[in-house]
Amino acid sequence: MRIWEFIETEQGSLASPDDSFEGTDRERAVALGYFDGVHAGHRILLEKLCYLARKRNLTASVHTFSSLPKSKNGNGEGESLLLTTLSERYHFFERIGLDEAVVFPFSPSVSDISAEDFLNIWLRDTLHARVVVAGEDYRFGKDRSGDISLLRKWGEENHVEVVSITPLSYKGQIISSSWIRDCMRDGKIQTANALLGYPVSYRGNVAEGKKLGRTLGFPTANIECEAGKLLPAFGVYASVLYANARCYPAVTNIGFRPTVNPEDDKPMIETTILDQQVDLYGQHIRVFLFSYIRPEKRFDSVAELREQVHKDMAEVRHYHEVHANDYSILLAGVI
């Protein structure tokens, strides 16, 4: 998949880093949206785009942003914590079958582009869109003034096929990235996984820490959360650790480790593989979360913590015995 990451110049205009995009006059089918999480509803839209692109011999393209618009984060802040990093979105786009991603920074100059200029300058004159696919609730342009009705009218005037996708629902509620974020903050990881269509995960290189887990009898593989990515409710999770092309049933603690490191101000993701020891120091791993076991808690002593960890591991071991087939199916789509 080709990636075009536009940058904002000192003059406030947008340009591809080497100006190479200016020579791409191919006709495109373009999907519009941010697609944080690339959840089950997003994938229906993107798969429809790929189908239409192949049918009409067009380039399957997604137009998105490198940072989250204020209208998307729900808290009024400039940037929100994300379900997926930009590289993870690229990974999903490629697996779905997209040919390219056209990525804008959500800068002041971009947010000031009028709905009409976005349609005419970018979709028509720059991307050469012949098909546009968007959700029924898609908004665009300065102050979100453009909607699907304006997009359809423009499509009729410019002989561009505009396809709107009805939002996908789960148990009577429309699936959205904001709902998934709420589920994660509330520890409802199984619901979040159902809405995404794949398990929440974190990746990183295993850092050599203080080896406190080893002294307590349960060595851990520790990674930091990727910058800008949302962590779920702090606590203990049934998980799967993926490394060396293998999946290991595991238990994961996410949080500040208040019993052994009360001064910590940076949350960690600590994972213990069940019933075997695997040397993972320095390796790149991925941790998938499947079930929330309990919230993070500060214990009065290390002995009390050790006792609780054994209880956690017994509960997680039982979870894996019961649900091994379930998580194998979910993992098949993302590994």
Image: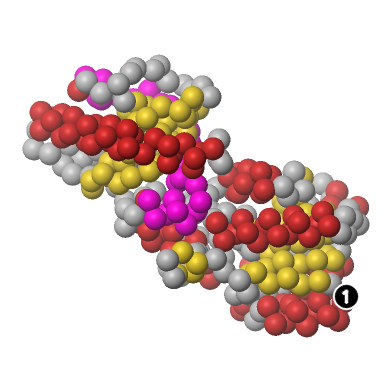
- Looking at the picture, how far across and down is residue 76, in whole percent? 46, 70
Q: Is residue 213 magenta?
A: yes
Q: Is residue 305 left or right of residue 229?
A: left
Crowd around label 1: few <14 · some 14–19 · many ≥20 (10 Å) = few
Based on the displayed image, in which of its 4 quarters is residue 258 positioned?
A: top left
Based on the displayed image, in which of its 4 quarters is residue 104 positioned?
A: bottom right
- Looking at the picture, how far across and down is residue 218, in whole percent? 25, 23
Residue under the image location 78 percent in, 60 percent down: 52
Based on the displayed image, in which of its 4 quarters is residue 182 positioned?
A: bottom left
- Looking at the picture, how far across and down is residue 220, in whole percent? 32, 26
**Total labels drawn:** 1
Q: Is residue 77 left or right of residue 107?
A: left
Residue closest to the eye, 52 or 84 = 52
**First to last magenta residue range:** 190-215
Residue 204 appears in view:
yes
Residue under the image location 34 percent in, 54 percent down: 188
- Looking at the picture, how far across and down is residue 14, in whole percent? 76, 60
Circle 1: residue type: His
Residue under the image location 74 percent in, 77 percent down: 151
| Way the structure is coloured | secondary structure
Q: Is residue 266 left or right of residue 333?
A: left
Q: Label 1, secondary structure: give it.
A: loop
Instruction: List the residue tagged with mark 1.
Output: 159
Up/down of 245 relative to 3, above or below:
above
The N terminus sits in image quarter: top right
Residue closest to the eye, 128 or 171 = 171
The C terminus sits in image quarter: top right
Q: Is residue 286 left or right of residue 290?
A: right
Q: Is residue 32 magenta?
A: no
Residue under the image location 68 percent in, 75 percent down: 141
Up/down of 239 relative to 66, above or below:
above
